[in-house]
Amino acid sequence: MLTQKTKYALKALTVLADEQAQDGTALRIEEIAERSGAPKRFLEHILLDLKRAGLIGSRRGRNGGYELIKDPRRVSLAEVLRLIDGPLAPFPCLSRNAYQRCEDCKDEVSCSVRAVFGGFYTTYILMLESLTLSDLMREARPLERFGLPGLGGGE
């Protein structure tokens, strides 16, 4: 499950991407908070993380604020999720960036839990890596390109 922090980050990035597409002006944190529905004081920390990662920049002065500095088509959702929440793998032995051998596993090759979740995780990661901030901006259903219908509710 995604954290609320990640959800706010994605919404803030979408607001900045929309602004970039319209007229390219920088937005003050108050404007981003209002448009995204994220609390301002929570958003301050998120925007700093996004800035450190090189996704957004800031301008000082009267027309200052935050702006998206990366093309929305080049910002994968997986990149944002990893940045905000850390590794995406369900087990450390499946992680690309934070690999660790599981202490209770005698043999990764014959581990059925790793095999089953590894297959699921690979599919999940391939989809997340291919979905971008640009997909969040569209009204189309991005999962349809994978032959999947849009999801309603439930788990």
Image (cartoon, rainbow, N blue to C red):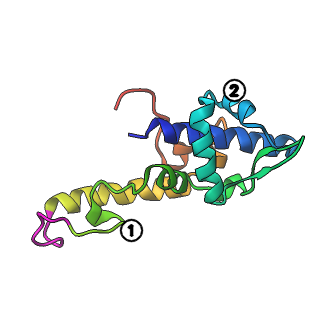
**Is residue 120 visible from the viewing direction of this image?**
yes
Residue at 35%, 64% (x, y): give it: 95
- How many numbered circles are shown? 2
Residue bearing the label numbered 1: 96
- Mark 2: which amino acid? Glu
Q: Nearer the viewer, residue 153 or 36?
A: 36
Magenta-span inclusion, residue 52: no
Kind of residue at badge 1: Arg
Task: Name the residue located 30 percent from the left edge and 59 percent from the top edge.
Answer: 119
Give residue 10's quadrant in the image. top right
**Residue range highlighted in magenta:** 102-111
The residue carrying pointer 2 sits among few (fewer than 14), some (14 to 19) or many (20 or more) residues within 10 Å by Cα, namely few
**Disc on the earlier residue, 1 or 2:** 2
Q: Badge 1: how crowded within 10 Å, few (<14), some, or many (20+)? A: few
Q: Which residue is nearer to you in this view: 147 or 53?
A: 53
Which residue appears at 69% of the width and 26% of the height?
34
